[in-house]
Image (cartoon, grey):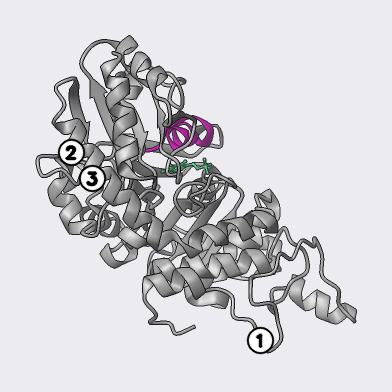
Amino acid sequence: MEKKSRLATLCVQAGYEPKNGEPRVLPIIQSTTFKYDNTEEMADLFDLKKEGYFYTRLQNPTNDAVARKIAALEGGVGAMLLSSGQAANFYAIFNICEAGDHFVTSNEIYGGTYNLFGVTLKKLGIECTFISQEASEEEISKAFRPNTKALFGETISNPGCQVLDIEKFARVAHAHGVPLIVDNTFPTPINCRPFEWGADIVTHSTTKYMDGHATQVGGCVVDSGNFDWEAHAEKFPGLCTPDASYHGLTYTKAFGKMAYMTKLVAQLMRDLGSIPSPHNAFLLNLGLETLHLRMLRHCENAQSVAEFLRNDSRVSWVHYSGLPDDKNYALAQKYLPKGSCGVIAFGLKGDRDTAIRFMDSLRMIAIVTHVADARTCVLHPASHTHRQLSDEQLREAGVAPDLIRLSVGIEDVEDILDDIRQALDKI
Ligand SMILES: *Cc1c(COP(=O)(O)O)cnc(C)c1O
């Protein structure tokens, strides 16, 4: 595979290159283990002296091929698949933060990530400060402490559909000697490649558009290889000082640009074990092969639906960054010139029950706890995904109580509009 191949070609071809006589399609290596002829070869693998497979919790050829494809799409030096997007965000932070550390995050993030960061990581002794991503660089800087190890945001927030000013975030992070971690789930690398704007690490819930058919739950962490850990060695002892669990090996010295990824696999995956099954990686790969085509259609359809909703008198507000009067329009023109994604957030005039009546009247569009699927679907975050959050936390996370999250699929847009029209008529 040519390194400079274009995105559509990478979607179809990257990651797996069969040799003469090998299967054309990525094989599912559904094996926990791999056989060796002598003890020394196996020992070298355990010491990280040689590359090779020995146990699927650490590495598996099917999973690795799909990770290589995602790394190629994002323009990173390496990637690792995980069993969920939640695991991906946990590993991305936990790889550089330990008890007593702190990080800064936008408050415009997915509800599951908000809980992970604000509640569960706190129990592990890792604190975070939530900030508004619209704040100035000076304001955001005030949240940083001597023990701050990362800055985090979502390219397009779920479910609020706010667009992150990645360059601004990268400047603030780098001014404080820490990496910027960006969850790029919604735009996918087809519509935005955060590394090109200064992000250092990218995470994904591959459950969403990358799979696109709602068949597997998965995650991915990708490293740009750009962050200079050694330049801030005192902040990142886990990467820059010897690892007792690997005979005193130092990741930055032994692996250079692959230090962060190697630690993620060799230490966190070894000890925590959130691997996807090779069969799930195979399904994810099928999704990735058409990602470039689907994203185009998701965006086209969502643009038409957003314009329709914008002009309907029963709709009180619409957030879709492709609408010229949306407050994120300018940011989207800069970071997402080809389109954002298929997700629209909107509210109806009336009360909470109006939203419920609208959703219950839909025929083709299904109420599901999912988003970014080929099939159009809808969710009311305040009563579903975000129900653990208080009203104040809801507002902080950019989720109005009347917010309806519509995930526009790739059906014929006229059928999607027909269904929305008939449901609006019933409220
Ligand atoms: C869904 C989602 C997650 C969590 O991913 P799972 O695969 O459901 O664990 C994280 N971030 C974003 C932006 C998401 O949409």
Residue positioned 54% across, 44% down in the render = 214
| Residue at mark 3 to residue at mark 1: CA–CA distance | 43 Å
Q: Is residue 30 above or below residue 360?
A: below
Is 156 inside the magenta-drawn segment?
A: no
Residue ID for mark 1: 19
Q: Nearer the viewer, mark 1 or mark 2?
A: 2
* Residue 29 left/right relative to 158: right
Q: Residue 63, image x and y in percent?
A: 63, 63
Question: Mark 1 falls on what kind of element?
Answer: loop
Q: On the image, numbered disc 2 is attached to which residue?
A: 307
Characterize the local packing of mark 2: few (<14), some (14-19) or many (20 or more) Cα atoms within 10 angstroms.
Answer: some
State if disc 2 and disc 3 touch (CB < 8 Å): yes
User: For the stretch drawn in magenta, what is the main secondary structure?
Assistant: helix
Task: Tell me the number on the disc at residue 303.
Answer: 3
- Percent across and percent down for residue 205 are 49, 48
Residue 104: x and y, percent? 35, 43
Marks 3 and 1: CB-CB under 8 Å?
no
